[in-house]
Image: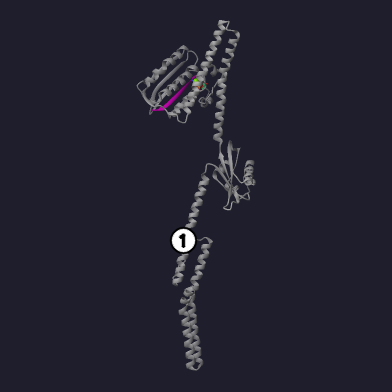
Amino acid sequence: MKDLFSKALLPYVLVIILSLLATGLIIWQSEGHPFVLIVLLLIDMVVFLSMFSLLFNKYVKPIHKATYTISQIVKGNYNVRFHSSASKEIEALSLKINSLARNMSEISMQEQRHSEQLSTIIDNMQSGLVLIDEKGYIHVVNRKFISMFGKTVKDYKGYLYYDVLEEEKFHDTVQKTFLYERNIKESFTHRSGLNKLHLEIIGAPIFNERSMLKGAVLVLYDITELKKLEKTRKDFVANVSHELRTPITSIKGFSETLLESGMNDQDTTKEFLTIIQNESHRLQLLIEDLLSLSRLEREDFRLVLNKFKAGELIDEVLPALKHNAEQKGLKFSVDIDSQLMMKADKERIKQVIINLLDNAILYTAENGSVEFYLGHVEDYIHIKVADTGIGIEQKAIPRIFERFYRVDKARSRNTGGTGLGLAIVKHIVEVHDGKIDVESEINKGTTIHIYLPK
Ligand SMILES: Nc1ncnc2c1ncn2[C@@H]1O[C@H](COP(=O)(O)OP(=O)(O)O)[C@@H](O)[C@H]1O
Ligand SMILES: [Mg+2]
């Protein structure tokens, strides 16, 4: 540095020394003539001034510019550049400053990209998120959180959590997270408009690199669907138990009575045994339906697809059903395209037809009629079962496919149905990627259409 400085300044110093020496020499020669003295003084002044201005332009001015450029970079303006070729040294400096500015700009762009990516991720999370610092101020709330709790980001950011988060469980979770410095899990229900949400909240402490607590992050999971499933499962178990209890109680009761009475009266014995037989038949049907449903619901369930003519399918199920219908005094008509080729799980489709026709026969009074049609529309096999029975009220139609749902509880149970027939139908049609359509009018009849892809 010292070297460079002396090298850069040497010519200027030499010029000044030379001009001073020359001045001294001339003064000595001219013996101090006043005119010469004045002229010399002027010349020296000109030399000094031009040296000074040269030095100023070459070093001081560019350094000023460089200082200004650096101060802009410090302020965060990375677009400034500094160009000067006043001297080799200054040129090197300008190159360094410009590359520093470029690097800083690259780093800041990268940082911006990262922070954009991070906020995109946070905002698109399927869980609500709140970030709180160690003093309790909220720094981040994401979009999902807003959709759960309403208001806008501005209403939360920068505020103390206990001032803006109304739910008591939030306060609990934050306090416990700070107190125990470990993850805390809680759950609560929250009303959001008309919906009731079941939420799970997890508070996790945030530490800095010196393991000091710097805040907490709260994550909110919407477990409403999970709760619903859990409830469906519980309801199902309760329903199954209820359905099983009725026939079992009756079998137990009648067999006990029979044993106690010593089976003396033949007629009563026969009557009781018939009841026991009917009830055990009902138990058997119920258990078979439950098994069918659980098989359909298994994770590893697979359809056994095979190709067959519609006629084959019908021959295997219709005679028995037709017999049932006629025994009940119903008109039974069939219209099928027997040559139609189908690709489906034959046994399951048979079950669909049996369940639908069973219902049609079951819910149609004497002298009514039941109609079965099988044909095709566009790319679909169309199966239609129509009856002139009791019909289903409009608001019950969407529910008849639920397990154990019966429009008329007492009556349907007495007819011998298990309450699972249509639930099984729906399942089978769905695994075939098919559709179901129901038309019904009270006391006029019901028509159920099934569409299966060919
Ligand atoms: N063809 C129909 N006519 C009138 N009601 C029907 C018909 N099919 C089904 N339902 C109604 O839908 C309910 C559910 O049917 P399903 O699942 O087969 O159970 P169930 O064992 O009671 O027949 C029945 O209880 C009945 O109320
Ligand atoms: Mg049924």
Dividing the picture into quarters, in which one does residue 348 lie? Answer: top left
Instruction: Measuring from the top left, give residue 225's x and y in whole percent.
Output: 54, 35
Residue 426 higher or lower than 318, as above or below: below
Instruction: Measuring from the top left, give residue 207's x and y in whole percent.
Output: 58, 50
Residue 339 higher or lower than 182, as above or below: above
Residue occupying the point 48% across, 87% down: 21
Residue occupying the point 51% across, 46% down: 121
Circle 1: residue type: Arg
Is 444 part of what is drawn in magenta?
yes
Who is closer to the viewer here, 296 or 424?
A: 296
User: On the image, numbered disc 1 is attached to which residue?
Assistant: 102
Who is closer to the viewer here, 421 or 89?
A: 89
Is 154 part of what is drawn in magenta?
no
Left or right: residue 383 compared with residue 186: left
Give SS at disc 1.
helix
- What kind of colouring is applied to the model shown? one colour
Is residue 391 visible to us here? no
Left or right: residue 360 compared with residue 247: left
Main structural element of the magenta stretch: helix, strand or loop? strand
- The quadrant of the image that shows the C terminus is top left
Span of residues in magenta: 443-454
